[in-house]
Image: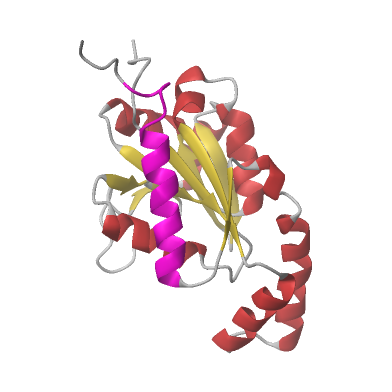
């Protein structure tokens, strides 16, 4: 039976493209070694240097689909002919070891995961959701243009998607308005430490 007062966190960070989600996740993992990245399943072949169970769990397409049919994934998607998914069992195993787990997902994936987590008391107890975005759409556009990696039509498409994604922020526990990398990390660590100290997660103090 899982510990009802476990302080292990399932931290879900989501953001529109260009808001700095990947950078924030990297910074959090570097600042808090006790936080571990959720390992995703994929049907694509391993790239040079990638390790099974560290970078990904590599599954053939038939095995992946069997696990989808069995309801084992909290969220899954197909991108460029390869499938990716987050196993419920993978998250629970880490949380039961007392490890904090970080999920870096897009806004659509976040909605799917939250819906799947809701009926599961153990995952629901651990889940903390953070929505990262720029203070305005104009700020996001400046960031996308500064990257200088996308054509104009791609930038406009990303902004159109971002407008709809930003409207989802009230469905998250926290709204983090991105300014600078150090400030984003500082505020994310404030959220992290506050959640670790929630009375619902704490063991009773000694008397």
User: Which residue is drawn at the image coordinates 25% and 45% (left, top)?
Assistant: 34
Query: In the rendering, at what x and y percent does residue 178 appear?
Result: 55, 66
Image: 191 above or below 66: below
Range of residues picked out in magenta: 181-202
Residue at the outermost front position:
207
Image quadrant containing the C terminus: top left
Image quadrant containing the N terminus: top left
Nearer to us in this view, 116 or 126: 126
Query: In the rendering, at what x and y percent does residue 159 appear?
Result: 74, 72
Question: Is residue 132 among the parts visible in the rendering?
Answer: yes
Image: 1 above or below 61: above
User: Which residue is drawn at the image coordinates 45% and 46% (left, top)?
Assistant: 191
Q: Is residue 11 left or right of residue 80?
A: left
User: Which residue is drawn at the image coordinates 73% and 87% (left, top)?
Assistant: 152
Query: In the rendering, at what x and y percent does residue 60 appear?
Result: 43, 47
User: Which residue is drawn at the image coordinates 36% and 42% (left, top)?
Assistant: 193
Image: 15 above or below 68: below
Q: Main secondary structure of the magenta part?
A: helix
Q: Is residue 58 left or right of residue 117?
A: left
Does the magenta run of residues contain 182? yes
Nearer to us in this view, 197 or 3: 197
The image quadrant of residue 166 is bottom right
Nearer to us in this view, 154 or 48: 154
Query: In the rendering, at what x and y percent does residue 201 appear?
Result: 38, 24
Question: Is residue 45 among the parts visible in the rendering?
Answer: no
């Amino acid at each position: 039976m899982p510990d009802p007062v476990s302080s292990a966190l399932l931290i879900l960070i989501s953001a529109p493209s260009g808001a700095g989600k990947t950078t924030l996740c990297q910074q959090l993992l570097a600042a808090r070694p006790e936080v571990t990245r959720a390992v995703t399943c994929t049907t694509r072949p391993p790239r040079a240097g990638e390790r099974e169970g560290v970078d990904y769990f590599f599954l053939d397409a038939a095995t992946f689909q069997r696990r989808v049919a069995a309801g084992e994934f909290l969220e899954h998607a197909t991108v460029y002919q390869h499938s990716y998914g987050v196993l419920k069992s993978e998250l629970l195993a880490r949380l039961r070891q007392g490890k904090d787990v970080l999920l870096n997902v897009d806004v659509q994936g976040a909605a799917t995961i939250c819906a799947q987590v809701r009926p599961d008391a153990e995952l629901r107890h651990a889940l903390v959701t953070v929505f990262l975005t720029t203070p305005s759409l104009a700020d996001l556009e400046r960031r996308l243009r500064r990257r200088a990696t996308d054509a104009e039509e791609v930038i406009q498409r990303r902004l159109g998607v971002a407008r709809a994604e930003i409207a989802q922020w009230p469905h998250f526990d926290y709204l983090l308005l991105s300014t600078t990398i150090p400030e984003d990390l500082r505020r994310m660590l404030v959220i992290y430490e506050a959640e670790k100290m929630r009375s619902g997660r704490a063991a009773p103090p000694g008397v």
